[in-house]
Image (spheres, helix red, strand yellow):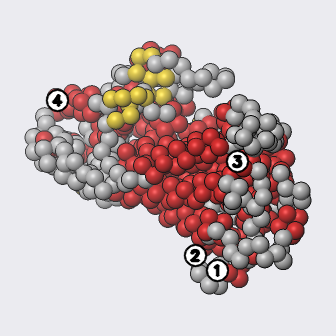
Amino acid sequence: MTAAQQTVALDPEALSFADVVAVARHGARLTVPEHVAAAVAASREAVDALANAEKPVYGVSTGFGALAQRHIPHDLRAQLQKSLIRSHAAGVGEPVEREVVRALMLLRARTLATGRTGVRPETFETYVALLNAGITPVVREYGSLGCSGDLAPLSACALVLMGEGEVHGPVSADGTPSAPVPAAQALEAAGIAPVELREKEGLALVNGTDGMLGMLILALHDIDVLLTTADLSAAMSVEGQLGTDRVFQPDLHHPLRPHPGQAEAAANMLSALADSAIVASHRDSTHLVQDAYSLRCAPQVNGAARDAVSFAAQTASRELRAAIDNPVVLPDGTVSSNGNFHGAPLAHALDFLAIVLADVASMAERRTDRFLDRARNQDLPPFLADDAGVDSGLMIAHYTQAGLVSEMKRLAAPSSVDSIPSSAMQEDHVSMGWGAARKLRTAVENFGRVVAIELYTAARGIDLREDAPAPVTGAVIARLRQTVPGPGPDRFLTPELEETIGLVSSGTVLAAAEAVSHLVRVLPEFSGEQSAAEA
């Protein structure tokens, strides 16, 4: 089954991380189970009853935010919904990525499917139809403070549901996105009728943390691949620089310092170096009493990052079972205000990941630098050059890596410590989680580049050794050499580095290693890439 043919059941209690990636990134289609449709219909009955009551109910028969004190008469409520969406669709800047918008929409649809938001069945069904038709609203980069939900981004999506705003249509066969077109035109072409929103539906469509959560789940997917690959690149640096594998033995980790991530990273490094003739060639040598920290302490740093990822995944898992809306429909039919839309839990996790990725990247850069320094690289040529002096080797590849690491350190400054009060001081503390998510996306992309440059460098260093590498590292180098040449005179490096980055980020390098030996993944739920709906 191809990704486009894959289906995911929109069950709010069963949707998985892999499902989110399948819909957001690979275009999987949604199906709606009967019990979900029934729950949506039942909660709408409660909202209709409150809409007809004399007592004002926030979000049903009142204004919003700082304007919540005004009771809105029946004949103005449809206009109230339109005004809410139009005014809140106020984002600016470049459009965000298609996969982010699709993740955001899927997660908002999941919350609508909980039966806690009170939308009408036809509104819910139309929202799902947009996703299945491949219609992607144009959502702008700036506009969310990560509190009261991702208001501006979600409003841009709700605007399309009304037949307004701009969208990208389905991508072409080669993956090229379409140019923006008016939403009304795209909906008509897809046979989707715009929705006339009614009581409560405007808030239900925009009051969620879905953008932050979607970007976190996509980042976790990519980090799972990249951080496991970082264990490989660290092991290759140890091998190529004649380091010892003794420091990765199990008895030095969990029994002495029981951090799970540290033990997992050490196990991966030990597996990667198993049966290495290079390591065996100097096992009894006294050329170094101890390896440098960047070699010896790699499990401690990579492992701490793994534990941080586990924390972030736990946060995302809890949020993936949440029903974020304000007000929310309770099981007894009452509608109650709450503060669950605040993005602090997600913002903290997003910022934490940016911090730990910067640290792992910083250590990888130090290992790369050691490879290029004749005084520290154990008799390899300076800069791993073919004819040092005539050739500069990988000198500037390291510059590029160092520049990426410096950028990652800037991106590690947390967004969640900031707050700018808004809405006439009604929203007097906000999470800035959307900003945390946006910078994490850049940090993850740069992290893949940093790991790839270390791996590229380590592969060249190992190729310059006389003895054979380990089966695992040898398999990685063999896969790399299918499209990336080995040592030799200076040549145009950018295409080779970009090819290596692609092989690392896509998981191709990791797959080559896993074909030879078991490696411990950071988040095993991603390794199968299977939808929970199909499992």
Depth-wise, is mark 2 or mark 4 nearer the camera? 2
Mark closer to the observer (4, 3):
3
Q: Are marks 2 and 4 in contact (CB under 8 Å)?
A: no
Residue at image point 50% right, 17% down: 179
Residue 48, position in %: x, y?
27, 42
> Which residue is the site of mark 4?
76
The residue tagged 1 is: 254
Q: CA distance from mark 4 to mark 3?
A: 72 Å
The residue that label 3 is drawn on is 383
Looking at the picture, does residue 364 appear above or below residue 170? below
Q: CA distance from mark 2 to mark 4?
A: 59 Å
Tag 3: amino acid? Phe
Q: Residues within 10 Å of mark 4 (few under 14, many from 20)?
A: few
Q: Nearer the viewer, mark 2 or mark 3?
A: 3
Q: Nearer the N terminus, badge 1 or badge 4? A: 4
Q: Nearer the viewer, mark 1 or mark 3?
A: 3
Which element carries disc 3, helix, strand or loop?
A: helix
- Answer few, some or many: residues within 10 Å of disc 3's Cα (few below 14, many 20 plus, some between 14 and 19): many
Identity, as a three-letter code, of the amino acid under mark 2: His
Secondary structure of the residue carrying numbered label 1: loop
Element class at badge 4: helix
Residues at discs 1 and 4 in contact (Cβ within 8 Å): no
Q: Amino acid at mark 1?
A: His
Q: CA distance from mark 1 to mark 4?
A: 64 Å
Amino acid at pointer 4 = Leu
Q: Which residue is mark 2?
A: 259
> Disc 1 or 3, which lies upstream in sequence?
1
Query: In whole angstroms, how far apart are the C-alphas of marks 1 and 3?
Result: 37 Å
Disc 2 is placed on an element classified as loop
- Disc 2 to disc 1: CB gap under 8 Å: yes
